[in-house]
Image (cartoon, grey):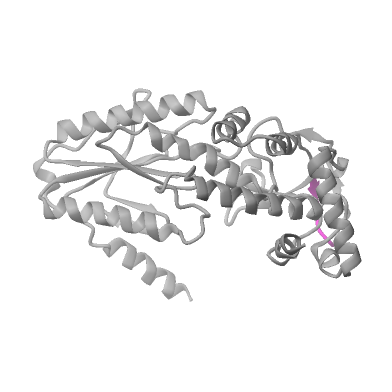
Amino acid sequence: MFELKTALSRAQDTSPGPDGITYNMLLHLNTTSFSHLLILFNRIWTEQKYPSQWHEATVIPILKPRKDPSNPLHYRPIALTSCLCKSFERMVNARLIFELEKQGCIPPLQSGFRRGRSTFDNLVLLETQIRNSFVRNKHLVSIFFDIEKAYDRAWRYGILSTIFNFGFRGNLPIFLNFLFYRTFRVRVGNFYSNHFYSNHFIQAEGVPQGSVLSVTLFIIHLSQILNFLPSFVHGSLYVDDLQISCQGSNMNTIERQLQNAVNKLVAWCDKNGHAISAEKSRCVHFCRKRNIHLDPNIQIRNAPIPLVNEIRFLGVIFDRKLAFLPHILHLRKKCEIF
């Protein structure tokens, strides 16, 4: 009962899914109804029989800020699913995260959506690496990857395989397999006009849209990419924000080690259904006397990764000399708007 009430208390009062049941309704149930709901959840878990509406999602396209509304790619899909199903998922997710952390299944360099961790960990790690290279009069080259449509392309069998390799058996893999079978339809319109619904479609790949477990499942799977980095190359992840770095005195050695690491990451992505964009990825050569030395040339499938003087990483702009002047100017400009 405690887990159920905790799951409901942590839920935001979002719009309901296809069944029309809201979190506000669930929060106002009496003790007897809570007991019946808990019995229902336990039967669903043990018997592996799920309500048909738990398979369905209503997708609402939200236009991205300052984008052309005539381009379908400029909309962000928001999936509305059953609040009952999400409450059940939240209970499963809490237990799953506890076991993952207890067994050390998630690499320590993955900071996304973990208790006691934040973007601050990744930012401080990168800054420390840069400052250490400056103190030792070395170069540090860092690559910031763009994984194209990472959530939508996540390999489902790979996720289940990773869960299995961690030792999870029984009803959990069966429940996750249920989540992967999801249909959706798109709703167009607002409160002042009639809603229009598209036909139903099957989400054939990626983590399930609108699922509470989606982020956890994605992190479990993508975090395995860090295990394929060579020993001289360091990396960090914040969900799907992947960054790797290598420092040294010889630029040719740094370039060779980073290229080897990139090749291994690309091979892992090919095997697991992901794709790294060379065009959208960025490379930064951190050095206070950079003009004396040649810049690295790192490639993804013979396409060079663009070399830039500054990069916005998890909300902070890092420049090649670590002066943070571009970040300060950016903040000042934002303050002037208000």
**Of residues 262 and 279, which is closer to you in this image?**
262
For the record, the magenta segment spans 186-191
Q: If the image is split into quadrants, where does the N terminus sit?
A: bottom right
Image: 159 above or below 75: above
Q: On the picture, is 283 further left or further right than 109?
A: left
**Of residues 223 and 278, which is closer to you in this image?**
223
**Image spot of residue 240 (x, y percent):** 49, 44
Residue at 37%, 27% (x, y): give it. 264
Residue 10 shown in magenta: no
Q: On the picture, is 65 further left or further right than 92?
A: left
Count of all numbered marks drawn on residues in the image: 0
**Of residues 114 and 68, which is closer to you in this image?**
114
Q: On the picture, is 210 further left or further right than 291?
A: right
Is residue 28 visible to us here? Answer: yes
**Image spot of residue 155 (x, y percent):** 59, 30
Residue at 53%, 41% (x, y): give it. 220
Image: 272 above or below 338: above
Is residue 279 visible to us here? Answer: no
Residue at 85%, 38% (x, y): give it. 49
Q: On the picture, is 35 further left or further right than 107?
A: right
Residue at 68%, 40% (x, y): give it. 208
Residue 314 lies in what quarter of the image? bottom left
**Image spot of residue 142 (x, y percent):** 29, 43
**Of residues 64 and 158, which is closer to you in this image?**
158
Image: 44 above or below 65: above
